């Protein structure tokens, strides 16, 4: 057996900032080298950030990526780090003739092995995901080469992200060709309870490949996606050896005892990938002999967050990165005294600090006294910046010039509030946070250009029942201070905001249940209709009331045009309103209820 110390760089790149990402790679490689790492592995497309979407279709972007990885190899050598092999993801291109249906320029979701000032080997993702949030047939062509390089007497293979999630391909090739370690750069976005699925998958693939497996995942927010890290190392038998923390950058150092290389021949040969394709294996040698025996560091196995804690961490990280990566210094939101705006304000305070959070209380003629007092209590508990702008006279000014009644009059109030928030955003440069939840967004219980006006929607993918659960959970963490919790001495959300019956307060004595079912009933139905794509017959067979099924399907389907115009927000479920769920606005299909 041979020893190998690997460093998994669980990092948070910025899409399109090749220079900053390169600087971070050099810094983290130096840290790894100082700790004696023999190999450093960065995440999928780390150099360019991920996902880059249609940027890969620009020749200038792909050329910049290719040039950057070559320059980076030279820079590492110039800075005394050339002897430490580094694997980094970037965008490359395949040497393919243009054809109809092929992405412009034939881009590759690639990974490069950097060593001694040069790009020693390249590979690219073989399996291209085309489901959920992924559109990779639009962007990339399939990779068909796998380098297996000998490092200190151990053969190390490289695969990329989706290559683990599909049968056949690189994992099957490693099993046939033989290797002591399979390293897999990833950019695998978060959704609830995915960490359990991920560990089981990595364990199974290690056993199939017949070697240890090191899985390094991106961390950070990128528009609608949140990446949770949770990098893993497992043995050839699938046992967990090391695990990084969730939602935070970490250099995971792990010492492994691995089988010495069994095959002496170098060069290239073809292997049946067991998926209808053939992959060319390229064997190369960086260092033939094992390192002298050394005392290994104890492996790190980070404790995993519980379900509610990981959702909250995902939301905080998403807001923090959206603010920082888009250059905002502060956020603003309307604070009504209700639970949705209270939770949104709390997430913002935890993400960027209450001193950078601005809230606006906008009472109307229908606002209750407890709404105003609950909002003021939250301001006092958290120390956010607050101002009060009564909207009664502003609404009256509109009503003097145009005759509105019923729903139009109610929506006017919401639109006045949206106008005020957008005006303050324009004046002071704040990012406007919308406060709508997934239940309301699903049912169309929001006002276009009113409470839907804004730049980012932190709880867009959070059902109402989970809003309450998150709020109660957050209050139990009062006094705790860490990367995701600000450290408020008292519970940050007023108890009355959590316990009182929800109301939009746009007319006298209004309650959400005037227009919607009870949220525990509604959310269960929405979960089946939206998340699981059940039709009406399936919903009734699952135990939902037929009349309620017909009503909720009608509400959801009719609100598609509103959701298309809603700001982006972090995905936490298997199917969010955005990349995951794409339905036509102009659509005459109607589910029939049995």
Image: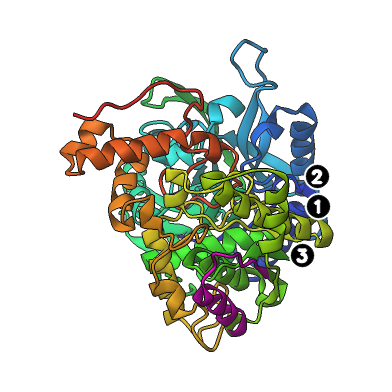
Residue 172 position, x and y percent, is: 38, 34
Return the residue nearer the eye: 273 or 101: 101
Q: Which mark is residue 71?
A: 2
Q: Nearer the viewer, residue 28 or 560?
A: 560
Q: Which dot, 2 or 3, sits closer to the camera? A: 3
Label 2: few (<14), some or many (≥20) within 10 Å?
some
Q: Residue at x 75, y 61 (%)?
A: 430
Q: Which residue is mark 3?
A: 329
Q: Is residue 258 magenta?
A: no
Q: Mark 3, residues whose alpha carbon is within 10 Å: few (<14), some, or many (≥20)? A: some
Find residue 546 and report its image quarter: top left
Residue identifier under label 1: 75
**SS state under label 1:** helix
Q: Residue at x 65, y 48 (%)?
A: 46
Residue at (80% x, 44% y) in the render: 71
Disc 2 and disc 1 in contact, CB within 8 angstroms: yes
User: At which x and y percent is residue 449?
Assistant: 64, 45
Q: Quadrant of residue 467?
A: bottom left
Provide the secondary structure element on which disc 3 rests: loop
- Image height check: is 550 above or below 408? above
Q: Secondary structure at mark 2?
A: helix
The residues bearing labels 2 and 3 have C-alpha atoms spaced at a distance of: 33 Å
**374 within the magenta span:** yes
């Amino acid at each position: 057996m041979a020893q190998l110390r690997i460093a998994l760089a669980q990092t948070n790149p910025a899409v399109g900032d090749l220079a900053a990402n390169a600087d971070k790679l050099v810094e983290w490689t130096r840290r790894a080298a100082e700790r004696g790492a023999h190999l450093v592995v960065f995440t999928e497309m780390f150099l360019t950030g991920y996902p880059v979407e249609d940027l890969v279709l620009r020749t200038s972007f792909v050329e910049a990526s290719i040039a950057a990885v070559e320059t980076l190899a030279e820079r590492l050598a110039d800075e005394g780090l050339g002897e430490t092999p580094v694997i980094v993801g970037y965008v490359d291109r395949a040497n393919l003739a243009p054809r109809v249906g092929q992405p412009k320029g034939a881009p590759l979701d690639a990974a490069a092995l950097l060593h001694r000032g040069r790009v020693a080997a390249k590979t690219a993702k073989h399996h291209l995901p085309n489901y959920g949030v992924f559109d990779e047939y639009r962007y990339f062509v399939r990779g068909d080469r796998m380098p297996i390089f000998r490092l200190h007497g151990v053969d190390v293979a490289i695969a990329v992200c989706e290559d683990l999630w599909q049968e056949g391909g690189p994992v099957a090739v490693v099993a046939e060709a033989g290797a002591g370690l399979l390293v897999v750069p990833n950019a695998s976005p978060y959704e609830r309870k995915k960490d359990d699925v991920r560990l089981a998958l990595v364990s199974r693939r290690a056993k199939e490949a017949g070697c240890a497996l090191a899985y390094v995942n991106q961390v950070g927010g990128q528009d609608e996606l949140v990446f949770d890290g949770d990098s893993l190392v497992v043995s050839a038998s699938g046992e967990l050896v090391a695990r990084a923390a969730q939602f935070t950058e970490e250099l995971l150092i792990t010492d492994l005892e691995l089988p010495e290389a069994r095959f002496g021949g170098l060069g290239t040969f073809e292997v049946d990938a067991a998926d209808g394709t053939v992959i060319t294996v390229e064997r190369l040698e960086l260092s033939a002999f094992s390192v002298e025996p050394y005392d290994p560091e104890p492996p790190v196995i980070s404790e995993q967050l519980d379900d509610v804690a990981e959702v909250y961490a995902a939301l905080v990280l998403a807001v923090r990165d959206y603010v920082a990566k888009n250059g905002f210094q502060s956020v603003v939101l309307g604070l009504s005294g209700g639970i949705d705006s209270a939770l949104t304000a709390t997430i913002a305070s935890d993400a960027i600090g209450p001193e950078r959070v601005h809230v606006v209380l906008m009472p109307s003629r229908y606002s209750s006294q407890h709404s105003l007092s609950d909002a003021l209590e939250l301001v006092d508990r958290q120390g956010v910046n607050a101002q009060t702008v009564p909207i009664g006279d502003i609404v009256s000014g509109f009503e003097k010039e145009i005759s509105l009644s019923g729903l139009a009059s109610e929506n006017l109030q919401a639109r006045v509030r949206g106008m005020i928030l957008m005006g303050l955003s324009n004046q002071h440069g704040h990012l406007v946070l919308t406060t709508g939840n997934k239940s309301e967004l699903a049912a169309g219980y929001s006002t276009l250009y009113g409470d839907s006006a804004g730049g980012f929607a932190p709880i867009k993918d959070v059902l109402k029942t989970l809003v309450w659960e998150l709020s109660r959970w957050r209050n139990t963490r009062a006094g705790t201070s860490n990367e995701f919790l600000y450290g408020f001495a008292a519970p940050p959300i007023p108890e009355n905001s959590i316990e009182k019956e929800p109301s939009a307060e746009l007319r006298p004595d209004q309650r959400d249940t005037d227009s919607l079912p009870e949220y525990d009933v509604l959310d269960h139905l929405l979960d089946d209709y939206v998340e699981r794509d059940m039709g009406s017959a399936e919903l009734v067979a699952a135990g939902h009331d037929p009349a309620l099924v017909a009503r909720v399907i009608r509400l959801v389907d009719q609100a598609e045009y509103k959701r298309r115009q809603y700001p982006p927000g972090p995905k936490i479920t298997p199917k969010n309103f955005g990349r995951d769920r794409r339905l036509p606005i102009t659509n005459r299909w109607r589910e029939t209820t049995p």
